Structure formats: structure tokens, C-alpha cells
Amino acid sequence: MHAYDRDTPRSWRLLNATQAVAAALARRLGYNDLAAFGIERAAARSDDPNLPRLVQLSRALLMMTAGAWKPGLTMVRRAGERMDADTTEARVVSGALQLRAAMLSARDGDAGAAWEHYGAAAEVAQRLPKRAQDFYALQFNLANVEVHGAAVAVELEDFDDAIRRDAQMTTRWQKTPSGLPPERHAHHEIDMSRALVSVGAFDKALRRLVNADKIAPQMTRYHPMARESTARLLDHYRTLPEPLRVLQDRMALS
């Protein structure tokens, strides 16, 4: 009501940020209809030209969750058209749109488009200041772009390339990568578990899943790819290792 009563650009920006958080939570819990409803019109009433593009970015993520790769890709490409990328904030949004397009293209099986979009995102990230602010909570930085590179390879089922990229990142990072939030780090661990299961490296895959569960337990418990990899590990082991038994119980997998 405050936004409607005051009708100032700042109030609409705050409302938009609140709706984005609510939509993200609804999507993670599987309520895509509520998430779509939450991505509302406040962006259009703020004075920030990037917010309407971020609405499309969020909608494209819902499309990706629903398996509508091509419509989602069309959406993010249109959101990036005629974009004035003179400010750091705009460049961050542009890079995030390119990353979303890369993932949508990969899931659609278009390797050429996926790597083209990924390359564009990497170029944007390399031009950002080293300590750039996390504009719009997009977590767009070099570390996040790198883990998306491994994710693109996984979605294209080029598991050897995904494992190679992960090894290169691990060598550089040593520990938790700088600038990568726990949720994104756990998602990378889940992606690598999927790749490792697919090449028959079951013990390594289990270790990556256990690591994901330590970093972001609630996300790992409900993440469909984590559950799929856990199910494949359950099928592989004749005698279940204790860490796998714990994951099985947490995910309520029979």
C-alpha cells in the first residue's frame, strides 16, 4: 500500500525487490504459478530502466524451470535488445541476460548458441571492476560466470569438458571461490556430481553431493538434479556408504 500511496520511483523499486524475493522463493518451492504472479508491474513504475529487463530475466527462469527453452530464450534476447550498457549496473544486467540465454540454449541442445552467449557474458564480466557492487543481487562476477561454463557443458552432456573446467577452477580457487554465494557454490557441486555420475566416477560424485548438502542443505534436499544423482548412486552401490544413506533419508528416497 505504501507504494500506491506514495507513488514514488523509490517505493516502486523497493516493491519490485520484495516481489523478486517472493517470486524466487515460490519458484524454489515449486509454485511456478505464484512465482509468475509475483513478478509484477512495479518495475515499470520505477525510474530504473534495468528493472523491466530483470522482470523478463525472472520470467525466463520460470520458462526454463517449466522446460520451455525456446520461449525463454526469445524472452531474454528481446530483453537485451537496444540496451544502453554505459553504466556498470546495465552491464551487469546485460551479462546476466547472456548467462540465462547460454543456459537456455544449452538445455535446448544448441551448443553453438550456448557458447556464443556464454562468451558474451564472460567478456562483460572481465570488464567489470574487481570489486564491483552486486547490483540487483544478480551475483554476476567472474566466479559465477566460470561455474556457469561448467553448467553449460553439463547441460550439453559434454561431461569431460565440465570436469576439465571444474579442475581448472579448483586449481585456482583452492577453497571456496571468492565472490560466489553458498547457493551458487552448492549448485555447482550438484552439477559436478551429475557429470561425475555420468562418466562412472561414483565415489567422486558422492563426495560432491555431500559437499553440496553441507553448503546448502535445504536447496540440495529439494533440487531435482541432486535427487536424480542420488537416485543413480543408490542404483549403483550394492552396499550403501553412510553418507549416501544420510542423503537418501534426507530426500526421503526409497
Image (cartoon, rainbow, N blue to C red):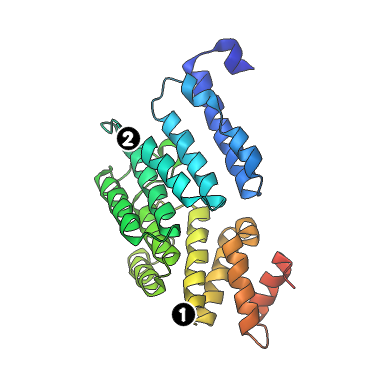
Q: Residue furthest front?
A: 70
**Picture residue at 65% right of the left edge, 76% below the top:** 244
Of the residues shown, which amino acid type is indicated by label 1? Val
- Image quarter of residue 223: bottom right
Q: Position of residue 58 (x, y in %)?
A: 50, 40
**Picture residue at 52% right of the left edge, 77% below the top:** 197
Residue linked to disc 1: 199
* Picture disc at residue 232: none
Is 133 positioned to the left or the right of 246 in the image? left
Mark 2 vs mark 1, CA separation in Å? 39 Å
Q: Earlier in the sequence, mark 2 or mark 1?
A: 2
Looking at the image, is 65 positioned above or below residue 14? below
User: Relative to the observer, which residue lies in front, 60 or 224?
Assistant: 60
- The quadrant the C terminus occupies is bottom right
The answer to whether any part of residue 177 appears in the image is no
**Picture residue at 49% right of the left edge, 65% below the top:** 191
Is 97 positioned to the left or the right of 243 in the image? left
User: Relative to the observer, which residue lies in front, 241 or 84?
Assistant: 84
- The quadrant the N terminus occupies is top right
Is 169 positioned to the left or the right of 21 in the image? left
- Check if mark 2's residue and mark 1's residue have beta carbons within 8 Å: no
Q: Position of residue 159 (x, y in %)?
A: 41, 72
- Image quarter of residue 227: bottom right
Of the residues shown, which amino acid type is indicated by label 2? Glu
Residue linked to disc 2: 81
Q: Position of residue 102 (x, y in %)?
A: 38, 53
The crowding category of the residue bearing disc 1, from other C-alpha atoms within 10 Å (few below 14, some 14 to 19, many at least 20), is few
Q: Nearer the viewer, mark 2 or mark 1?
A: 2
Looking at the image, is 6 positioned above or below residue 59? above
Q: Secondary structure at mark 2?
A: loop
